[in-house]
Image (cartoon, helix red, strand yellow):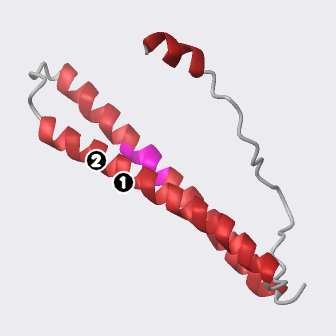
Amino acid sequence: MKNMHVGVRVARQVRTAEHAVDQAMIEISRLVQTALEGRVEARLAAEVGQEALANMVRGLSQLAEVRGAVIASHSELAQVADDHQVGWHMDGAHEDKTVKPTGFAPVLAVAA
């Protein structure tokens, strides 16, 4: 494997970017929750702040698209590294990449 320092640097930055997008999604989700709770606590009608709420949710949706793009680039960069013998495996804790059922499937099936 060649260019191990480059590969590891890119791999670390990919993981940093993935975590940053996740954190942004968490913060927007908290904002949505806080805004909804605030509306209820202030005893405001449901239509109050609807456009702002819609924009928050739209932003969250767009972040989900960004997350998907970053994940796709992760796989694509791994392929580039393999194709060009660029070392990229990092030491330390690794993230589990197995996709596991969330437990929501039975609930969603009932709701459908």
- In contact (CB < 8 Å): disc 1 and disc 2: yes
CA neighbours of label 2 inside 10 A, class few (<14), some (14 to 19), many (20+): few
Q: Is residue 53 above or below residue 38?
A: below
| Callout 2 secondary element | helix
Q: Is residue 26 magenta?
A: yes
Q: Which residues are magenta?
A: 23-28
**Residue sitting nearer the eye, 108 or 9:** 108
| Callout 1 secondary element | helix
* The label number, if any, that marks residue 62 in the structure image: 1
Task: From the viewer's perspective, tell me whether residue 40 is left or right of residue 93.
Answer: left
Residue 9 lies in what quarter of the image?
bottom right
Residue 72 lies in what quarter of the image?
bottom right
Residue at the image point whose x is 84% and y is 70% from the top: 89
- Quarter containing the C terminus: top left
* The label number, if any, that marks residue 58 in the structure image: 2
Residue at the image point whose x is 85% and y is 61% from the top: 92
Task: From the viewer's perspective, tell me whether residue 26 is left or right of residue 72.
Answer: left
**Residue sitting nearer the eye, 20 or 11:** 11
